[in-house]
Amino acid sequence: QVQLVQSGAEVKKPGASAKVFCKASGYTFTTYAIHWLRQAPGQRLEWMGWINAGNGNTKYSQSFQGRVTFTRDTSASTAYMELSSLRSEDTALYYCARESNSFDIWGQGTMVSVSS
Amino acid sequence: EIVMTQSPATLSVSPGERATLSCRASQSVSSNLAWYQQKPGQAPRLLFYGTSTRATGIPARFSGGGSGTEFTLTISSLQSEDFAVYYCQQYNNWYSFGQGTKLEIK
């Protein structure tokens, strides 16, 4: 079946970086864009940006510009999100989602906790 | 940035009854509006896109409507599995979500 499976939870110190993967299966990876979103405790979902899985083009939300990088490995049908210069406010559940008629398939989420 | 506002924050409804959830956009999003359902410990699940087009597998008791800045999600006869948090999301100008409406059992 069509699914996105994300990497496991991470605990980071302030100033460190976190890298999350999102592995696609059940469809042709390069056909759809992958978006990254996050949900901090008690907050609404926040869009971070997207990567065109076919050509690798990216678009980042201004809120994260300069701190986030999206990449993909087509041979592994996997997208990656790296967030640098982490601060406590970055503690959140990070999701990848496939773009088709908005976001039709979501990963299970990856908890990134930032604490000294 | 387009701000999405949902109301009410919490809606208490008895099983079998009708529930109507509202979503307002700070400026027109045309019909580029989606609804999601989220249960505890799960990722959001797409219910509607294009305001009123049901996603795959969504039962007919769910309906979506509206246009421009005012949108509604209606569940005609609530089932136990429908109690969850619902989010609206616009994709007319980048992407933004409402704060959610929690639908709870009365």
Image: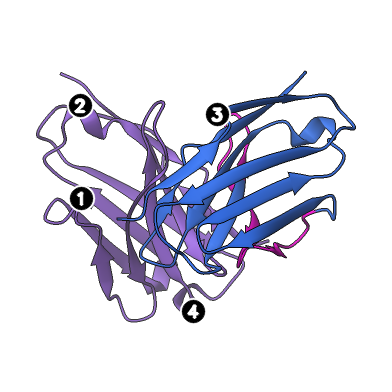
Chain colours: A purple, B blue
Rendering coords of residue A49 (x, y %)? 31, 59
For disc 2, the marked residue is A88
Amino acid type at circle 2 is Ser
Q: Secondary structure at mark 4?
A: helix
User: Visible in this render: residue B6?
Assistant: yes
For disc 3, the marked residue is B9
C-alpha span from label 1 to label 3: 26 Å
Say yes or no: labels 3 and 2 on the same chain.
Answer: no
The answer to whether the residues at label 4 and label 2 have Cβ atoms under 8 Å apart is no
For disc 1, the marked residue is A63
Amino acid type at circle 3 is Ala
Q: Nearer the viewer, residue B56 or B54?
A: B54
Q: Few, some or many C-alpha atoms within 10 Å of disc 1 (few <14, some 14-19, many ≥20)?
A: few
Q: Residue B20 is drawn in which quadrant? A: top right
C-alpha span from label 3 to label 4: 37 Å
Range of magenta residues: B37-58
C-alpha span from label 4 to label 1: 27 Å
For disc 4, the marked residue is A31
Q: From the viewer's perspective, is residue A87 above or below residue A81?
A: above
Q: Few, some or many C-alpha atoms within 10 Å of disc 3 (few <14, some 14-19, many ≥20)?
A: some
Q: Is residue A27 left or right of residue A9?
A: right
Amino acid type at circle 4 is Thr
Say yes or no: labels 2 and 1 on the same chain.
Answer: yes
C-alpha span from label 2 to label 1: 15 Å
Give whichever of discs 4 and 1 has the lower sequence position.
4
